Amino acid sequence: MRRTRPFSVTVVLSFVVLGGIACSSSSTGSPTGAGGDCASLAAAECDKTQSCSPFLIEASYGSVDACKTRLTALCQVGFQEPGIGAATTFIADCASGYSSASCDAMYSGVPVPGCAIPAGTFAAGHACADHAQCQSLFCNKTGASGCGTCAAAPKVGDACTSTCGLTLACTNGKCAAQVQYGGVGATCSAAAPCAGTLTCFNGQCARPSGAGQACGSTAPACDVLQGLMCQSGACAPIQIASAGQPCGLTGSSYVLCFGGATCKTPTGSTSGTCDTVAADGQACDATNGPRCMIGAACVNGTCMTSQASLCK
């Protein structure tokens, strides 16, 4: 169960997991009975993402149907994790939230209405792999194993080294309120980012430049959600390549590897070749590739969609 990235699934080209899509499910029902519910949530999320950013669907999954298949499977894995104790209405509420959300809301930096992660069932001191397993919504991980113990959620001002849970951010060694993404016209900077549908231009959040429009120092950045990048002073499409194909800066184009695969680039070069993407259960290397499929993480050299079984 996770919504903010592998093992806590949560943004564009860095690599986005579609607005945080990755196994956001919970119910008091069984994994078997959850299949249809998971399919409905995956459909709502993938359809909304397709309407907001067809590029992200293509780059991440190849098609809307492939997105739905992957997210349904991840959701069902979430049901099987021990400690997940969400209300039975969560999936329906979250699916409804995605269906009615605007694209700005999808990439606002906060959960879509109805999709806030519910508390788990594990009490303080219980072994955990995910915040969602804990009653406090905080799994305190202190080592590199990926496992921790449920503990009281940190408060603003508490010391931190990596995470402060789902509602606070670890900033300069202290837990602090999460940065609120700015809307159109809001003041912006590196420390005060804009919503994912916007860009920071001359200190204010603005709509990004579209295909063929000017970009650079005199115009807003290109619309990355629509698969655009500034090339020779104008916004042009980012290309998508499969394993074994050229990637990076190739001629006058920028080429991204499908599914977040590594672009293996020789030292000193701006172009390379797309690596493969490792399937669930296959060998992986998070640094040098192959990377795992979206929704999985490389744990001890193996792609895993859940680490709960390792944390006891």
Image (cartoon, rainbow, N blue to C red):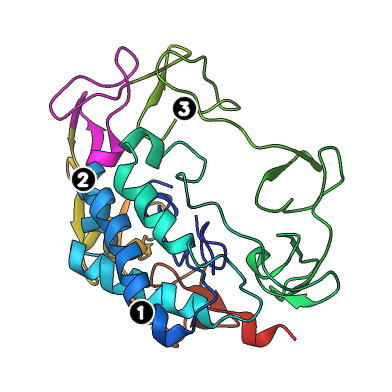
Q: CA distance from mark 1 to mark 2?
A: 24 Å
For marks 1 and 2 on the same chain, the one whose residue lies earlier in the sequence: 1
Is the magenta region chiefly helix, strand or loop?
A: loop
Q: Which label sits on residue 290?
A: none
| Above-or-below relation of 121 to 210 | below
For marks 1 and 3 on the same chain, the one whose residue lies earlier in the sequence: 1
Q: CA distance from mark 1 to mark 3?
A: 36 Å
Residue at image x 72%, y 53%?
163
The residue wearing badge 1 is 35
State the SS at label 1: helix
Q: Is residue 110 rendered magenta in the image?
A: no
- In the image, 53 versus 92, the foreground residue is 92
**Crowd rating for badge 1 (residues with CA inside 10 Å; few <14, some 14–19, many 20+):** some
**Crowd rating for badge 2 (residues with CA inside 10 Å; few <14, some 14–19, many 20+):** few
Residue at image x 36%, y 62%?
260
| Above-or-below relation of 71 to 96 | below
**Which quadrant is home to the N terminus?**
bottom right
State the SS at label 3: loop
Q: Amino acid at mark 2?
A: Ser
| Above-or-below relation of 223 to 22 | above
User: What are the residue bounds of the magenta stretch?
Assistant: 207-235
The residue wearing badge 2 is 51
The residue wearing badge 3 is 194
When asked about the image quadrant of residue 142, the answer is: bottom right
Q: Is residue 281 left or right of residue 121?
A: left
Q: Position of residue 270 (x, y in %)?
A: 33, 49
Q: Amino acid at mark 3?
A: Cys
When asked about the image quadrant of residue 32, the answer is: bottom left
Question: Do the CB atoms of the residues marked 1 and 2 lie less than 8 Å apart?
Answer: no
Q: Position of residue 150 (x, y in %)?
A: 79, 68
For marks 3 and 2 on the same chain, the one whose residue lies earlier in the sequence: 2
Q: Amino acid at mark 1?
A: Gly
